Amino acid sequence: MQIQENISLKPYNTFGIDAMARYFASFDNADDLQELLTPSSQLTTLILGGGSNILFTQHFDGLVLKNEIKGIHEIHEDNEYVYVKAGAGENWHQFVLYCIERNWAGVENLSLIPGNVGASPMQNIGAYGTEIKDVFFALEAYHKQERKILTFSRNDCAFGYRESVFKNKYKDQFVILNVTYQLKKHPKFNTSYGAIEQELVKMEVKELSIKAISDAVINIRSSKLPDPKVIGNAGSFFKNPEIIDVHFQQLKKQFPEIVGYPLPNGNVKLAAGWLIEQCGPEMGASWKGYRKGDVGCYSKQALVLVNYGDASGEVIYNLSERILDSVKEKFNVEIEREVNII
Ligand code: FAD
Ligand code: EPU
């Protein structure tokens, strides 16, 4: 455990932003974390996992703490479930593959999401019809001020669409140390979302399995999302907005092609990617595929902003502002950022 000074965060964020951290340290257990978070320190701290949902718009004049807590353990099982505890610093996709190898079901639809286990409950990661809340059992987190470890159940986390108590009420107060997932011994396949079924047919899958679903999800994701190792990005930059049905019906009259999904509460969730694709930097042009210098809006998925090289976080943020404004102007819909802005 060593505190380094003036460290470039470029290798630690998937946008590839060359921001500097005044101080930087890694920890792989709660005791070291406690030591790093000395009560006398006035430094602002930032907990970092894989850096795949963060945009640095400025240098970080505080202490960045990289969570490296490892370990995956089966802690309990009953007839239906295995309860698996994973260290916050485990890579998420490696954890998914570990579960698939053992035929523990529930996370296969979440294959290939970048980042670490510890961040998975932060925004209740979701993809292809599954969210963390569906497999979440409990987590342990360290309270920075009270200097003690607390356990959170599913209810305590107040999960919502890309939301949890850690992004709202308890923002910046806790460091997640480990997460326990409740995985099924007898899989219940979920292939209804998006293009999974189509992809399984294309793959000529004869017998459905969690491995086949994982492979299908990997194929679909690889075909439309940029690989951060090649093009800097943080996945969807914006959330899909929810609007009331009356507003949706008005929009539908004006824009018959608009993409919306009815929600159980009677509202409609709009595909922000579609809205963004219909807007652009000038009349007749679309944001989708837009590029100026090293900043752009990805050509295969308009929800994803990209850094082609040396774009600054500020320039990416400014593009996101222009996109938000253009969507508001054309559709009277407010879209929110999903990525954590630092
Ligand atoms: P980081 O970016 O390091 O951190 C994210 C936030 O959580 C920060 O505020 C950080 O301070 C905080 N944090 C991280 N770890 C801890 C901890 N242990 N304790 C307390 N706070 C912590 N997300 C989805 O939901 N669905 C997708 O389909 C999806 N697809 C993506 C595709 C691509 C190509 C990319 C680049 C990103 C995608 N994402 C997706 C976003 C991202 O992968 C997830 O949000 C992921 O959970 C972030 O993990 P991380 O470890 O990189 O978090
Ligand atoms: N669409 C367009 N143009 C685009 C992109 C999308 O018209 O450029 C429309 C299409 O009609 C498409 C629909 O939007 O059918 C939905 O697109 P997609 O299936 O790609 O999903 P998404 O709503 O854009 C969400 C998540 C992703 C997640 C996928 C799959 C959010 C903000 N994003 O994207 O999560 O992987 O569904 O479940 O909810 C992330 O959070 O970083 C992320 C990548």
Image (cartoon, rainbow, N blue to C red):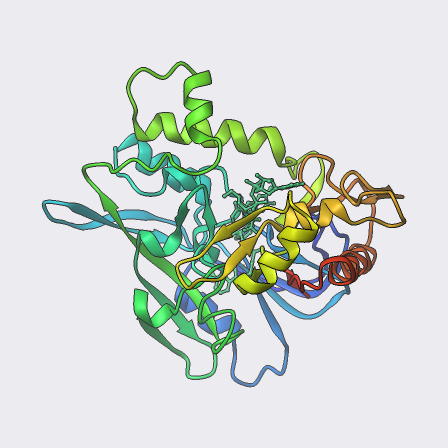
User: Horizontally, is 286 left or right of 129 in the view?
Assistant: right
How far across and how far down the image is residue 215, in percent? 43, 26
**Residue farthest toward the left in the current orientation of the protein:** 79
Along the viewing direction, whichever of 282 and 33 lies nearer the viewer:
282
Whether residue 103 appears in this view of the structure is: yes
What residue appears at the point 60 percent right and 53 percent down from the top-left corner?
51
What residue appears at the point 66 percent right and 61 percent down from the top-left corner?
335
How many labels, in total?
A: 0
- Quadrant showing the C terminus: bottom right
User: Horizontally, is 119 left or right of 82 in the view?
Assistant: right
How far across and how far down the image is residue 182, in percent? 25, 51
User: Horizontally, is 49 left or right of 303 in the view?
Assistant: left
How far across and how far down the image is residue 299, in percent? 74, 36
The quadrant in which residue 41 appears is bottom right
What residue appears at the point 43 percent right and 51 percent down from the top-left corner?
117
What residue appears at the point 52 percent right and 79 percent down from the top-left corner?
38
Along the viewing direction, whichever of 169 and 88 lies nearer the viewer:
169
Along the viewing direction, whichever of 151 and 165 lies nearer the viewer:
165
How far across and how far down the image is residue 184, in percent? 22, 43
User: Horizontally, is 42 left or right of 74 in the view?
Assistant: right
